[in-house]
Amino acid sequence: MIMRKIDVVNAVASLIVLMLLVGQGGCGWQRSTESISASSSEMAAPQADGSHEMTRSASAEDAETADDVDLSKAGGSPGQVTRRIIKTGDVTIEVTDLPATVDQISKLAEDAGGYVSGSRVYETAEGRRSGSIEVRVPADKFTVTFRSLREIGKAVSYSEDASDVTEEWIDLEARISNQKAEEKSLLALLQRKGELSDIMEIQREIFRVRGEIERLEGRLRYLKDQVSLSTISVTVQELGEVGLAERGPWRLAYHLRTAWAALARMVESLVYAMVYALIAGAVFWIPLVLLILWIRRRRRAREAHRT
């Protein structure tokens, strides 16, 4: 009986030990499974991050490529500035036939796509005829036209100048843009309801800004005209021999009439001056005359009293 109880106790103990062993094995297997899962997750996470980073890099490269394409379509690299140059020229030539030369200069200007903006022909005191012609031609035709004008006659002197107005050009465009933005803001404020004094103040500011815009735009239009069309001033001098041959006889009667007219104008001016002095100066000379008469009368009265 006792042996049977011992066997039962041993069997129960063995069963408990077996259950403990099985429980420990299950926990270890679970831990192993979790470790493997965690390792897999850690390995997968960097891979996912790497793929995301690669995708982002590819997108950045595509964006940079797109920017390069846009810049190429825009016509140049960023920071490139178109230079704005005003070209002017001045030339003095000697010719034998002044009227024919003036016509030739006009034709040269028209052939270049320009025009003659002004001309003046006069005769000097020595009897020589001279003229000054101002020509406006497109800027890209300036060099060719300037060379052709020098070759019309004997070039006594010539000079050319190029003035860079790029900085002023850009500054004007920026200031116009800012003024227009300010005008737009003021117009938006004007649409709101408010007191009459505020509305009048806004209107005055709008008028001021609009005037500044028109002034800046006028200056910019002038620069555009000067840049697109170059100015060449041509002084034409006719040779002395031709001028002396065309002087003709003496004009003594003409000069006598001119001298008599000058004398008459001088006498007329003198008479006008006396009239103004007599009337306008009465405020000064009438009291002076009265004072002189009073002094003389007092002096005579003293002399009479002494005698």
Image (spheres, grey):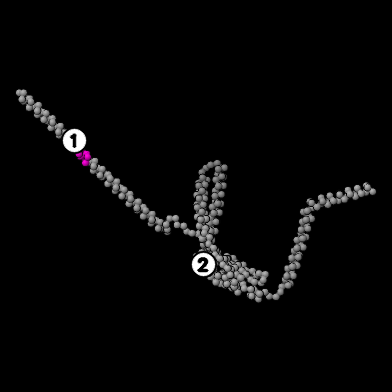
Q: Are marks 1 and 2 in contact (CB under 8 Å)?
A: no
Q: Amino acid at mark 2?
A: Thr
- Distance Cα–Cα, label 1 vs label 2: 98 Å
Q: Amino acid at mark 1?
A: Cys
Taking depth in this image into account, of 137 and 43 the one nearest to the observer is: 43
Residue 154: % across, % down: 57, 72
**Residue 143 bears which disc, if any?**
2
Q: Residue at x 83, y 52 (%)?
A: 289
Is residue 224 visible in the rendered structure shown here?
no
Q: Residues within 10 Å of mark 2 (few under 14, many from 20)?
A: few
Residue segment shown in magenta: 26-36
Q: So how many labels did they put on this image? A: 2
- Helix, strand or loop at disc 1? helix
What residue is disc 1 on? Answer: 27
The extreme top residue here reads: 1
Is residue 241 visible in the rendered structure shown here?
yes
Q: Earlier in the sequence, mark 1 or mark 2?
A: 1
